Image: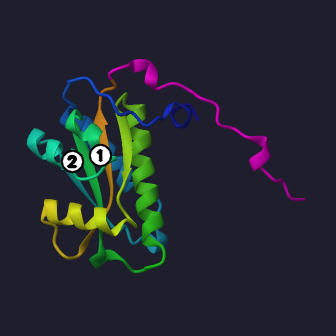
Amino acid sequence: MEIINKRRSIRKYDNKIIEQEILEKIVRAGMQAPSAINQQPWHFFVIRDRDKLVELSKLTAYSKMLATASACILLVSDKRHVKATSMYSQDMAAATQNVLLEATYLGVGSCWIGIYGRVDRMEKIKKFMELEEFFEPFALVSLGYPENKEDLKFIDRYDVNKVTYEG
């Protein structure tokens, strides 16, 4: 629970580079997500190129933090692996959450930038990244060491009014 409690959307990063082994651990965590009928529809693009990060930061009103991020991960659905069409977006959401939690565990700040479901964003990302037709953008996750280490702290969001116990 500690990692779940500490996870926050971090949008301000220092200039420290994230090590390759840390990035690999984050991607590995994404691939450990549950998946309907084990379809594992994901593919991960790890972007570290500064110019590309800056350009990505301009593509949506919500991706500005990419300009100062050390890296980002573009999670895409590989439609060649989708067997349960009504479930793959849930698989992708679980993979994205795993990425966020592992980043927090490793002391890396992250922020989920929603892409899926917003056709304009999906098309912009697909065009910018020159993705093959079978790749469907799902989410961007910015990554960087937090400018303020205190940002990764517990904030209690429990609300008893949003819970109903039956039986």
Q: Which residue is drawn at 9% across and 42% down?
A: 51
Q: Quadrant of residue 63?
A: top left
What residue does disc 1 label?
Answer: 63
Residue 41 forms part of the magenta stretch: no
Depth check: give the residue in front, 103 or 113.
Answer: 113
- Please tell me how crowded label 1 is: few (under 14), some (14-19), or many (20+) other residues with Cα within 10 Å: many
What residue does disc 2 label?
Answer: 58
The spot of residue 42 in percent (x, y) is: 32, 63
Spatial separation of the CA atoms under disc 1 and disc 2: 7 Å
Q: Residue extending furthest front?
A: 61
Depth check: give the residue in front, 167 or 59.
Answer: 59
Give the amino acid at mark 1.
Ser
The spot of residue 162 in percent (x, y) is: 75, 49
Do the numbered discs 1 and 2 sit on residues whose CB atoms are within 8 Å?
yes
Q: Which of marks 1 and 2 is nearer the N terminus?
A: 2
Visible residue check, residue 20 = yes
The spot of residue 131 in percent (x, y) is: 16, 67
Examine the rendered structure and indicate whether residue 64 appears above or below residue 149.
below
Magenta span: 147-167
- Number of marks: 2
Residue 158 forms part of the magenta stretch: yes
| Magenta stretch, overall SS | loop
Examine the rendered structure and indicate whether residue 120 appears above or below residue 140.
below
Q: In this view, does 126 lie to the left or right of 163?
A: left
Give the amino acid at mark 2.
Lys
Examine the rendered structure and indicate whether residue 63 appears above or below residue 103.
below
